[in-house]
Amino acid sequence: MEYFIFNGKLLKAESGIIGPDSRGLRFGDGLFETIKSINGQLEFIDEHFARLWKGMQVLQFAIPKQFTPDILEQEIQSLLKKNGHGKMARVRLTVFRGNGGLYDTTDHKPNYLLQSWALPDETGNWNSNGLVLGVYTDIKKSCDILSNLKHNNFLPYALAALQAKKEKWNDAVLLNTGGRLCDTSIANIFLIKDEVIYTPALAEGCIAGVMRRNLVEKLTVGGYKLVEDKLSVDELLYADEVFLTNSIYNMRWVQSVGDKKYSNAQTQKIYAAFFSTNS
């Protein structure tokens, strides 16, 4: 039996917790973090909490003194133990506002939900078979104060993922309202052209990925030429190599977007330099 934690209480998976007046249900009024646990160690936990707290400030939550990263980390460890997820696991931390309409919120304190799932031991290893991507064009992502957050109003990504499944892609590339590259349904995107690494700037509307930030710092310190900028679909299609990053899978190479095929020699070197010890 799987368990989850809701506002500090351990509950069985089938337990109901949200009523019809929940703003989280009505409006997607909340945020989430997806964290990888390896042998009980929560990867990049400080960065995940920093992004969450920044998001709560943007969404104007009233954060109680007893709602702290330390308490949440203790509860995550308790949940992992209860669910028997001692090796590799994915943890989802969701915060959302309580009951109320648009103008009559009961209070602004965060409700929170902790869940965990076991991951295969090979999660995060080098993907020998590259990913197949497509470009999703039905919805364009805006560039505003919400763009870099992992908020619960996630429809552009959810619909892009549905399109990817329909088209038998592994993932879908999303564009911003300017028609430029943003990110994918579950990852940040990087291009390599003539040994220069490119990734959409945060101002282009992509989620401020924890792994993205980590890799950008490592590449910069490592002497790689990295450019964060506006990137077009044409630049994606003329790139030599493409790879994706997120907190669960680390870094994965892309073999194709539509009819365009990519190599992976430079991507594999980057993976070996920064991620092979995690595999």
Image (cartoon, rainbow, N blue to C red):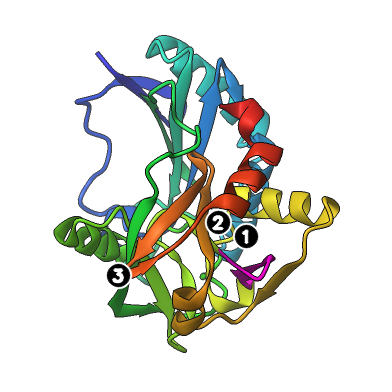
Residue 153 shows in the view: no
Task: Choose mark 3 or mark 1, whichever is in front.
Answer: 3
Helix, strand or loop at disc 3?
A: loop
Query: Quick one: which residue is furthest to the bottom in this view?
Result: 178
Q: Is residue 246 above or below residue 162?
A: above
Which span is picked out in magenta? 191-201
Task: Name the kind of residue labelled 3 in the image.
Answer: Gly
Task: Name the kind of residue labelled 2 in the image.
Answer: Phe
Q: What's the mark number on residue 258?
A: 3
Task: Name the kind of residue labelled 1 in the image.
Answer: Gln
Name the residue: 55% across, 21% down.
Answer: 38
Label 3 crowd (10 A; few <14 / some 14-19 / many >=20): few
Give the distance between the C-alpha atoms of the residues marked 1 and 2, in whole angstroms: 6 Å
Q: Quadrant of residue 279?
A: top right
Asked if residue 137 lies in the magenta stretch, the reply is: no
As rendered, which of 114 and 46 lies closer to the eye?
46
Q: Position of residue 67 (x, y in %)?
A: 60, 37
Residue 132 shows in the view: yes
As rendered, which of 17 and 247 lies closer to the eye?
247
Helix, strand or loop at disc 1?
A: helix
Label 2 crowd (10 A; few <14 / some 14-19 / many >=20): some
Residue holding disc 2: 61
Residue holding disc 1: 57
Q: Earlier in the sequence, mark 3 or mark 1?
A: 1
